[in-house]
Image: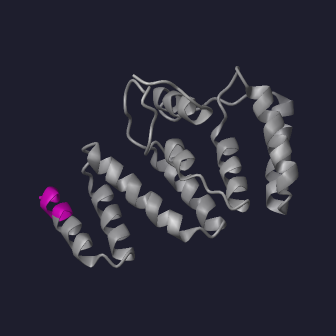
């Protein structure tokens, strides 16, 4: 297996091992920092939010993985700076993973929905379609042929006006339902 070259890769391996359930500290300072950071994001005080995030990351380092809310907030701040990192988002969801991963898990639909919410709130509609397509394609590639995944992929194709592909996937969904 490969090397873990950055934090995103390390987290993707850890996420898969923990089934996307990451523990958070329970101390009062951490809770206050989280609440303050959420307040700053709502007010659009991005520079101060980034400072608080750096502080939290430093304090969590070597003790805890970055929790979902922190990673999502960091992605949101990157978007606000005009730098959406799709690889980071895909690793967060589980669409992409490190070469060092021992086992490949299905992507997390909960995390997909969290990322999509952030993208909607930040008006990045093109990225929504792209992530949806990659999510459903990954689910199908991992032989998860549920009707939900097939219809999800068909919806992506229909939204892109690729009606022939959408119909093919719908027919496949009907055939597998029988």
Residue 15, percent across and down? 52, 32
Give the total number of marks visible in the rendering: 0
Out of 45 and 3, give the one closest to the viewer. 3
Is residue 7 visible in this depiction of the protein? yes
Q: Is residue 133 left or right of residue 45?
A: left
- Where residue 100 sits, quadrant-wise, is top left
Q: Is residue 158 above or below residue 145?
A: below
Q: Residue at x 84, y 42 (%)?
A: 52
Q: Position of residue 126 (x, y in %)?
A: 51, 69
Q: Is residue 77 magenta?
A: no
Q: Is residue 79 above or below residue 25?
A: below
Q: Please give the range of residues in magenta.
A: 172-178
Q: Main secondary structure of the magenta part?
A: helix
Residue depicted at x 33% and y 54%: 137
| Res. 117 image quadrant | bottom right
Residue 21: in sight, yes or no? no
| Residue nearer the viewer, 38 or 48 | 48
Q: Residue at x 65, y 66 (%)?
A: 121
Q: Name the side, left or right, on which 169 lies relative to 161.
A: left
Left or right: 159 as drawn, with respect to 32: left
Q: What residue is rendered at 56% in x and 29% in y?
A: 5
Counting from the top left corner in percent of width and height, residue 70 is at 70, 42
The scheme the figure's colours follow is: one colour
With 11 as the anchor, is 151 left or right in this view?
A: left
Measured from the top left, where is residue 73 in percent x and y?
70, 49
Rendered-image quadrant of the C terminus? bottom left
Q: Is residue 174 magenta?
A: yes
Q: Quadrant of the N terminus?
A: top left
Q: Nearer the viewer, residue 145 or 71?
A: 71
């Amino acid at each position: 297996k490969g090397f873990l070259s950055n934090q995103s890769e390390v987290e993707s391996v850890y996420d898969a091992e923990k089934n996307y359930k990451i523990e958070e500290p329970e101390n009062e300072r951490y809770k206050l920092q989280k609440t303050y950071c959420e307040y700053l994001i709502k007010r659009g005080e991005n520079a101060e939010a980034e400072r608080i995030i750096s502080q939290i990351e430093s304090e969590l380092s070597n003790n805890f993985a970055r929790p979902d809310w922190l990673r999502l907030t960091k992605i949101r701040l990157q978007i606000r700076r005009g730098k959406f990192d799709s690889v980071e988002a895909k690793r967060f969801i589980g669409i992409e993973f490190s070469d060092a991963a021992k086992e490949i898990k299905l992507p997390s639909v909960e995390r997909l929905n969290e990322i999509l919410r952030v993208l909607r709130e930040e008006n990045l509609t093109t990225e929504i379609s792209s992530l949806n397509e990659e999510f459903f394609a990954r689910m199908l590639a991992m032989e998860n042929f549920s009707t939900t995944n097939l219809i999800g992929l068909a919806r992506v194709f229909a939204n892109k006006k690729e009606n022939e592909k959408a119909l093919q996937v719908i027919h496949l969904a009907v055939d597998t339902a029988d």
